[in-house]
């Protein structure tokens, strides 16, 4: 099995729908110091949800930025305070955010999407390389991935350009 097959398997499992366990949002918030600047993905159907996490971060006073996928595989970021309803802008099948984005909001923490993760933090993304490019060369920026319990796997077939995350947690564990 390679990356493509692993992605297909996980996407098929995610189509069944899942719910996070009690305390999920609080467990994610515990990984991020109060007063942080946070870049956070907006969950696609089947992904561990992020809307409540974004709300909770904003409520406690953190600065939150949401991604906009742009041409050329680059991410821009929009301030979550003025971006409701939150949606996955620029992802195939979703609209492109109409306004300009910030190219680098200088985050303390980036909550990255992941299809799978290894115990060592090797992450399997969706395959576009958006987050790997954004995180390249950002020493000191913490990364947190969120997956479902059965998405912690022995191997994600990582390549040299794949960014290893600092911390990960399971939404339903």
Image: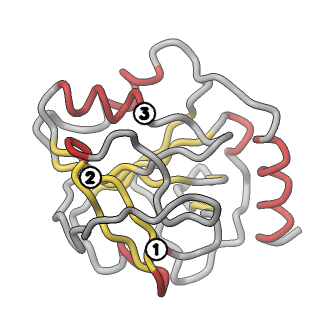
Q: Residue at x 20, y 41 (%)?
A: 81
Which x, y percent locates residue 173?
60, 24
Depth check, mark 3 against mark 1: the one in front is 3
Report, in whole angstroms, how far the alpha carbon at label 3 lies from the one at label 1. 23 Å
Most extreme residue toward the front is 98
Most extreme residue toward the top is 22
Report, in whole angstroms, how far the alpha carbon at label 2 lies from the one at label 3. 12 Å
Relative to 11, is 158 on the left or the right? left
Q: Depth check: 73 or 161 in front?
A: 73
The correct choice, above or below, for 138 with respect to 94 in the image is below
**Mark 2 and mark 3 residues within 8 Å of each other at the beta carbon:** no
Residue 132 circle label? 1
The correct choice, above or below, for 8 with respect to 148 in the image is below
Relative to 105, is 117 on the left or the right? right
Q: Depth check: 140 or 112 in front?
A: 112
Which x, y percent locates residue 106?
16, 64
Which x, y percent locates residue 88?
49, 53
Determine which quarter of the picture holds residue 6: bottom right
Report, in whole angstroms, how far the alpha carbon at label 1 lies from the one at label 2. 17 Å
Mark closer to the chain start, 1 or 2: 2
**Mark 1 and mark 2 residues within 8 Å of each other at the beta carbon:** no
Residue 51 circle label? 3
Residue at disc 2, secondary structure: strand
Give the residue at mark 2: 65
């Amino acid at each position: 099995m390679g990356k493509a097959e692993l992605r297909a398997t996980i996407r098929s499992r995610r189509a069944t729908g899942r719910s996070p366990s009690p305390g999920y949002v609080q467990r994610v918030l515990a990984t991020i110091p109060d007063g942080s600047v946070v870049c956070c993905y907006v969950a696609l159907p089947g992904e561990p949800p992020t809307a409540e996490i974004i709300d909770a971060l904003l409520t406690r006073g953190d600065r939150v930025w949401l991604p906009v996928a742009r041409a050329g595989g680059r991410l821009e970021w929009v301030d979550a305070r003025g971006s409701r309803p939150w949606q996955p802008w620029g992802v195939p099948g979703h609209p492109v955010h109409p306004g300009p984005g910030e190219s680098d909001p200088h985050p303390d923490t980036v909550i990255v999407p992941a299809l799978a993760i290894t115990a060592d933090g090797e992450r399997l993304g969706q395959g576009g390389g958006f987050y790997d490019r954004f995180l390249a060369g950002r020493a000191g920026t913490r990364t947190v991935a969120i997956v479902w319990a059965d998405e912690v796997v022995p191997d994600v077939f990582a390549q040299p350009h794949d960014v290893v995350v600092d911390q990960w947690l399971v939404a339903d564990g």
